[in-house]
Amino acid sequence: MIKKYEASTFILRVILGITFFVHGFVKFQGGIENIVGWFTAIGLPGFLAYVVASIEIVGGIALILGLGSRVVSALLALLMVGATLKVKLAVGFLGNGKMAGYELDLALLAIAVVIAINGSKMFALDQLIYKGNRTESKSF
C-alpha cells in the first residue's frame, strides 16, 4: 500500500523539479548574459547567474529523477532565501506591477524545505542505486 506522505512528497518533488528546471533553462535560452547583467546591476557578481541557472537545471533534473532529493532541495531552498531577501522582499508579497512579488518564491521555499526534511523515496532513482547498500541502524 502506498503511504500518503510518500505520494505527497513525490508530487511536490516532481513539480519542484520541473519548476526549477524550466526557470534555469529559460535563463540560458533567453540569453544568460542578460541575467549576468541584471545580477551585476543588483550588486551580485555576474558569474552567479551561471551558478544559479546551472543549479536550477541540474537540481531540477535531479529532483525529477529522485537523485539526492534532500541535498538538492536544501540547496534550492537557499537559492529561494537569497532571491527573496536580495530582490523580492523590497517589492512586497504580490509585487509592484513591474516585478512579481515573493509569493511564488515563498511557496517554492516551503516545498523545498518539506522535501529537504522528509525526503522523497517514491519512484526515486536513489532507491534503486542504494537499495543494496543501505543498512538499517537501530535506535537504543
Image (tube, rainbow, N blue to C red):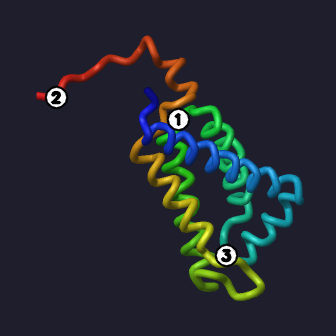
Asked if the residue at tag 1 contacts the one at tag 2, i.e. Cβ–Cβ closer than 8 Å, the answer is no
Q: Which residue is mark 1?
A: 68
Image quarter where the C terminus lies is top left
Percent of width and height locating residue 98? 77, 85
Q: Which residue is mark 2?
A: 139
Disc 1 or 3, which lies upstream in sequence?
A: 3
Distance from disc 2 to disc 1, alpha carbons, whole Å, reads 24 Å
Q: Nearer the viewer, residue 53 or 40?
A: 53
In this image, 135 relative to 83: left or right? left
Label 2 is placed on what type of residue? Answer: Ser
Q: Dot 1, how many residues are within 10 Å of its Cα: few (below 14), some (14-19), or many (20+)?
A: some
Q: Which residue is mark 3?
A: 43
Distance from disc 2 to disc 3, alpha carbons, whole Å, reads 48 Å
Asked if the residue at tag 3 contacts the one at tag 1, i.e. Cβ–Cβ closer than 8 Å, the answer is no
Q: Residue at x 55, y 64 (%)?
A: 107
Percent of width and height locating residue 115? 47, 46
Q: Nearer the viewer, residue 39 or 115?
A: 115
Q: Secondary structure at mark 1?
A: loop
